[in-house]
Image (cartoon, rainbow, N blue to C red):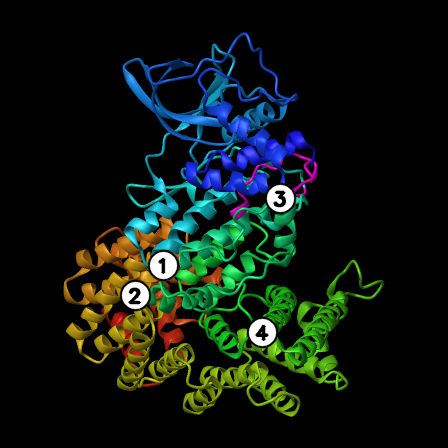
Amino acid sequence: MNTEREALAWFDRLVELDAETRAAELANLRAQNEALATQVALMLDRDVEPSGPLDRGLSALHLAEASPPKVIKAGDQIGGFTLGHPLGRGGMGEVWLAERVKQGFGQRVALKVLHAGLVHPDLNRRFLQECRILAQLSHPRIAGFIDGGVSDEGRPWYAMAFVEGEPLNTFVARTRPDVRARIRLLVEIAEPLAHAQAQLIVHRDLKPSNILVDAEGHAHLLDFGIAKLLDAEGFDSAETATGLRALSPAYAAPEQVLGERISTATDVYSLGLILYELLTGRLPHDRRGARLELLAEQVRRESFEPPSQLLRKHDDGDASLVRAIDADLDTIAMKATQADPNRRYQNAQQFGEDLTRWLEGRPILAQADTATYRLRKFVFRHRLAVGSAAVTLLALILGLATALWQANEARQARARAEASRLFAEQALADSRESQARTQRVKQFLMDTFVTADPLQAGSEKPLSITEAFDQALLRVDTLSEDPKLQVDLWDDFGEIRAGQGRFDESQALFDKALAQAEKIYPEDHPAIAEALVNRGVIAGYAGDNLAGAPITQSAVGNEAPNLVLMFDLMAEIDYKDGRLAEAAATNLRQLDIARRNFPAAHPWTASALTDVGWNHVEIGEVERGIAELDEAIEMYDQLDSPRVLHPLRFRAIIARNIKGDAAARVYFDRAWTVCRERAITHLQCDIIRANRAGVMATMGEGQAALDEAEAALVDLETRGAIKQSEYAQGLESKALALAGLGRRDDAIAVQQQAVELINSLFPDPHPERERVQKNLRKL
């Protein structure tokens, strides 16, 4: 970097600092390079002098000495805007609150104008680029472009929407929100950043001072002053180590400091550092005072510890924060701040989505491959309908590769933490083995299913997906030289067979996986745990519920998350078998564990409240059940979680039975509004739509109810739920609508379909069987 550009870079870095910090940084620079420090000090002095240009002493900065620039002040006019008071200053310009009155309407803006005396081509280019970038962005969380031009004194300016608020770090220090509230703020920033990245724009200067929180507690993204337009492949190929790198070193990604290629993952790194700071109150590194050359070397050596560990090391660590930062949140922060951009989330959307998964208590994509986590993912996976075999097989190819890669990441992290040479050597060996197995799994599946590809099958008739799958199962039996690959394939193919409803075949495959895993792995290995859980779940689905529960319990151990999920599964098995009192008791155990081990408002606690509340209603303890469901609704509202749909639907059903359709309609309408406003495409919304249609029918909205019921049935069919109890609910709503339209015979036929479906799903006697039979008699 030449002297001119290095001086400009240091000016950008120091001009935003307070006087004390700036003086300390400048003194440190002077000790290392006195000539450079003198130039930077001159630039800083001239920047604030009313009578002199910033550029004196730098040949690359041009300004006529005879015409010193006019210093702007309150009351001045720029582009039709009247300046009010200064809002701040940055590396290129100063920002003023300004107002323009047109046709009697006032418009307040934040007006940014280039610093007095700055007429450098690089800075002009950057300023104009910022205008262009803001002009093409339109998002409610981005302070948008309004107008721009050149003042009478020749200084470029532009006006953007004025956001009244305080910087993110100031807001957090003042209000001390809980961890979930902090994460929601970061999600709000990831959304507009993802919007910008979708247009090949990288912000490059993310930091708390560029994020304002308004009076309603919503975050807004500011200052695209050094944003970069990427090429079509998502990289900045023009600016390298010789370019002007205006950045905030504390939040800069390694590739920014090292002058390497910039991508959307660059902003992810900065978001990860902000996440660290939100969780711990400090950054995971100390880059203060380092020259760019020394900073580059420091960045190469940086290695961060998880936020929870960082917080525990400091005496001022907030105990409530420590408890709220779980392994998933640690993993998200660690993944976002990987030194290698290829190992981070690739864009802000992925980062924000994983934070949202954490908020909702769902499995995150970055999670390491542990026994606990594989159990959690498996149980969630089997609570919903499984899609077609072809889609599942595609997910299998991608999912196995991801799982094996994540396992490798976890082993490497442990090796660093324990600083054990032996373990590191083993981790390296395991890493190589995992990578090799990933390739073998992928190649196995590609070799098998290429026979189902008409473009690859040659002159022979291509196999169907089903035929190719059957051949794949036969091939797995021949892989005795690779027993670990056999375990993976038998286990995942067993899940596919379960999704197809072929439980006997899936059970046999899980038995094979378990037998082989027990031969080659230690007893606490994740593969053994998953095979055990699979066997327990499938035993329940196949009707042997009592046998399934102890198998599942043997796999999960005594960790709270495992136990919560296990009792949830056992309660569901009890409920389906008609043992409602036992289901309620099991859910109470689940609720007790959740209350004792998780924060006051937690998705798993709310889920347990929902289940136990409904079970209490079913066994006649209606008031108790209503109180539990209302608590679940309140908790989900605190969490801002779409899972509030579950207790809302139950409350609607109860209200319908006790107070009538009008009372139920209130809950159903609220739930349906959540579905529409959040654009949720999920089985739960299909059920709510179907139930709501039934209420509409009994309230006399016959044709509208029929349209809604039929739309819900189409969605349920699309989701593969045609053989589930939820589909029966849609049929019942359609029957009610037909009856309301005077089509009694059609209504009876449709209700009979619902009866037959429910009878095939529940034992006799069971409340569900009694209910649908009663509704049939009413017609």
Instruction: For marks 3 and 2, give the CA distance.
Output: 45 Å
Q: Amino acid at mark 3?
A: Leu
Q: Of the residues under marks 4 and 2, which one precedes in the sequence?
A: 4
Query: Which label lies toward us, 4 or 2?
Result: 4
Residue 703 appears in the figure: no
Q: Which residues are magenta?
A: 233-250
Q: Is residue 81 above or below residue 40?
A: above
Q: What residue is pinned by disc 4?
A: 414
Q: What residue is pinned by disc 2?
A: 601
722 left or right, relative to 754: right
Q: The residue tagged with tag 1: helix, strand or loop?
A: helix
Q: Amino acid at mark 2?
A: Ala
Q: Of the residues under marks 3 and 2, which one precedes in the sequence?
A: 3
Q: Is residue 759 above or below residue 301?
A: below
Instruction: Report the quarter where the C terminus lies.
Output: bottom left
Q: Amino acid at mark 1?
A: Arg
Q: The residue tagged with tag 2: helix, strand or loop?
A: loop
Q: What's the mark number on residue 180?
A: 1
Query: Which label lies toward us, 1 or 4?
Result: 4
